[in-house]
Image (spheres, rainbow, N blue to C red):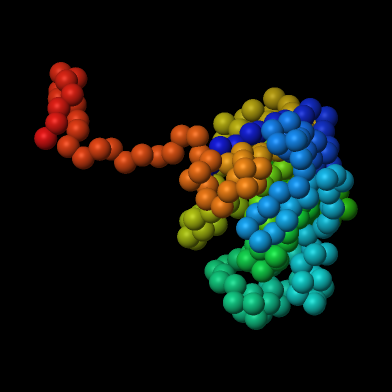
Amino acid sequence: EFTVLEAYEALGDYKSGMNLTESLLVSAAKESTGRLAFKNGDLSVDLTPPWPRRALLELLSERLGKQVHPSMPTEEARSLCKEHDVEFQDDWSSGRLLFELYDKVLMPGLEGPIFVYGYPVEVSPLARANKEDPTITDRFELVIVGREFTNGYSELNDPEEQLKRFRLQAVAAAAGDLEAPPPDIAYVRALEYGLPPTSGIGIGVDRLVMLLAEVGSIRDVILFPTLRPEQGLGLSEDGVLTED
């Protein structure tokens, strides 16, 4: 893995990104197979639109039986992680802890297709903050059979806010967070020239092909698998093929 199809729409937002994602996947299924119903192991997947759209915090609150929000005390979020056997680092905020609960407890049980939106700012460094609730972002994921198929959001186009987010990610990386991306200063500089409101999506092509082909192994659908070099073959300094 991983082949990704990315698309951007000027003057779009995360809602138009969901519309585009749904349209693309439904069209791909119809054109390639002539149907919208598929088997995935013991599960049946029906891609007939429209697909449900639910807020992450609402779904997670329902699953945990407790109202949760990124503004909740960190100790409460840690207790929920301990209760559900979700590992965490001591320096993680409530927003990051809630995302881990979503990722480990909620998402695996979502058969979908379903759009889940409203991800904490801490785990969405490139997404624009929601106008009504700045602790979450206008970001969505398409979940099918418990896996993420698409990630999309209203792009953050404020260079000062983007730099602030990158700095927070750098601090997290220094503290040992392996998932924190390195700061992209060139991107911040580009934003200073101006970016209109923009929608961006990224579709996992390999997972989509697995679903449409009804296969259980990603090895069966990867176009260009990574191969180990054959033992004993090599090139000499003058470029001649050699064999031990």
Image quarter (top left, top right, bottom left or bottom right) of the C terminus: top left
Which corner quadrant of the image does residue 154 belong to?
top right
Instruction: Find residue 117 and report its horizontal and vertical position in percent.
Output: 78, 52
Image-based side of 131 in relation to 100, left or right:
right
* In the depicted structure, whether residue 44 falls above or below residue 74: above
From the top left corner, tell me how far across and down residue 76 is, in percent: 71, 78
16 and 173: which one is in front?
A: 16
Q: Residue at x 14, y 31 (%)?
A: 243
Residue 180: tell me if it is visible: no
Camera-nearest residue between 91 and 81: 81
Measured along the vertical axis of the image, is residue 126 above or below residue 109? Answer: above
Looking at the image, the residue that sits furthest to the left is: 244
Q: In the figure, residue 108 lies in which quadrant? A: bottom right
**Whole-percent x, y for residue 33 in the image:** 70, 36
From this viewpoint, is residue 152 visible? yes
Q: Residue at x 80, y 76 (%)?
A: 66
Q: Position of residue 239 (x, y in %)?
A: 19, 20
Q: Would you identify the image quadrant in which residue 196 lies? A: top right
In front of the other: 242 or 100: 242
> What residue is at 76 percent from the left and 67 percent from the top?
60
Q: How many marks?
A: 0
Which residue is painted at 67% across and 69% down in the image?
105
